[in-house]
Amino acid sequence: MKSSNKNLSESQYKRAAAIASVTTACLLTIIKAAAAFTTGSLSILSSTADSLADVLSSVITFMAVIYSDRPLTCDHRYGYGKAESVSALIQAAFISGSACFILYDAFYRFFHPVILTQTFIGVCVMIVSLLITLLLIMFQKYVIRRIHSQAIEADSSHYVIDLAANITVLFSLSVVHWLGWTWFDILAAVLVSFYLIFTAFKIAEKALAEITDKEVDNSIKAIIVREILKIDGIKGYHDLRSRISGSRLFFEIHLEFDGELSLLKTHEIAERAEHKIVQMYPNAQVIIHQDPYGIEEKRIDNDIIGPCAL
C-alpha cells in the first residue's frame, strides 16, 4: 500500500508539471505573438516560434507522462517509461524546426530590412515572459527533485534555454529602442536559433541514450557494488547490467556464493541485497541470479568490447 501511494504521488507531480508547462506555453505564445505583430521584431518572432513549439512539445510531454504511468501489462512487462524518451526526441525535433525557421527569416531580413516600431511594448512583454518562465522553471525543478522524469527534465531544460533566449531578446530590444541598431535584432535572433539547435542536440542525445539502453552512471553502479559486497555471504559478483526507462531504473546482477550454501540461504542473502538496492534507489527493479563462487561459465562481462570502469 505504501508503494502504491508513492507511485500515485509521483504521477500527480508529473501531471501537475506537464499541465503547468502547457498552460505557460500557451500564455507566452499569445502575448509574444501580439508583441511580434505590434513591433515587427524578428527576435520576438523567434521567441514566439519557440513558444509555439513549446505548446506542441508540452502537449506531447503531457501525453507521454500519462502513457508512461500505465501499469505493467503482459506485452510490456518493463512498463511504458520509454514513452518519455520518445517525447523528448519529438521535443528536440520541434526545437530544431523552429530554430531553422528563424534562421531563414533572419537571412531574408538581412537583405530586406524591416523597421521596428513600439519597441518599448516589446521590452515590457519580454520582462513579463521572463517572470512567467522563471516561475515555471522553479516549479519544474521542484518536481524533478522529488521524482525522476526524463520528459519533465527535458521540458525544464528547454525552458531554461527559453529563459536565456528571452534575456537575449530583451537585451536586443533595449539596444534597438535606445540606440536604433535594427541589425542587432537580427543578430539576437540568429544567436537564439543556434542556441536552440544546440539544446535540441543535447536533449536528443540523452533520449537516444535511454532508448538504446545506455548503462546508468558508473558512480551509481559503484555504490551498488560497494554496498552489496558488505553483505555477509556474498563472495563476488559479475554481469552487472542496468538501464533506464522513464523514472524507473533496472538492474540485473549475478551474485556469487559459497557452493556449499543451500538454495534457501543464498535466496535470503540475495533478498537482503535486493532490499538494500531498492532502499538506495526506490524506483529500481532488481533481478539477481545466484551463482556458486569460482564456477567457470560464459559471462556477458567477457563479451563486452572496450574497457569498463566496473
Image (cartoon, rainbow, N blue to C red):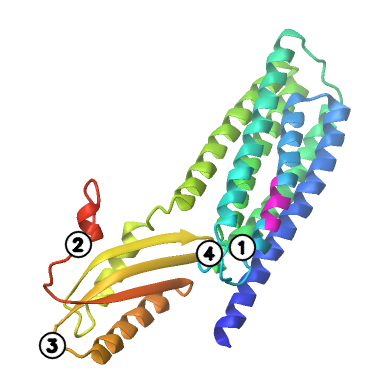
Q: Nearer the viewer, residue 209 or 96?
A: 209
| Label 1 CA crowd tier, 10 Å (few <14, some 14–19, many 20+) | many
Kindly report which numbered mark, 4 or 2, lies closer to the viewer in this rendering: 2
* In the image, residue 170 above or below residue 15: above
Q: Secondary structure at mark 4?
A: loop
Q: Nearer the viewer, residue 212 or 60?
A: 212
**On the rendered structure, is 46 left or right of 258?**
right
Disc on res. 247: 4
Kindly report which numbered mark, 1 or 3, lies closer to the viewer in this rendering: 3
Sequence-earlier tag: 3 or 4? 4
The residue beneath circle 1 is: 68
| Label 2 CA crowd tier, 10 Å (few <14, some 14–19, many 20+) | few
In the rendered image, which quarter contains the N terminus?
bottom right
Q: Gap between marks 4 and 2, in whole Å?
A: 32 Å
Q: Residue at x 55, y 82 (%)?
A: 3
Q: Residue at x 63, y 68 (%)?
A: 70
- The answer to whether residue 59 is magenta is yes
Sequence-earlier tag: 1 or 4? 1
Q: Secondary structure at mark 2?
A: loop
Q: Gap between marks 3 and 2, in whole Å?
A: 22 Å
Q: Residue at x 55, y 52 (%)?
A: 85
Q: Nearer the viewer, residue 282 or 126?
A: 282
Q: Gap between marks 1 and 3, in whole Å?
A: 44 Å
Disc on res. 298: 2
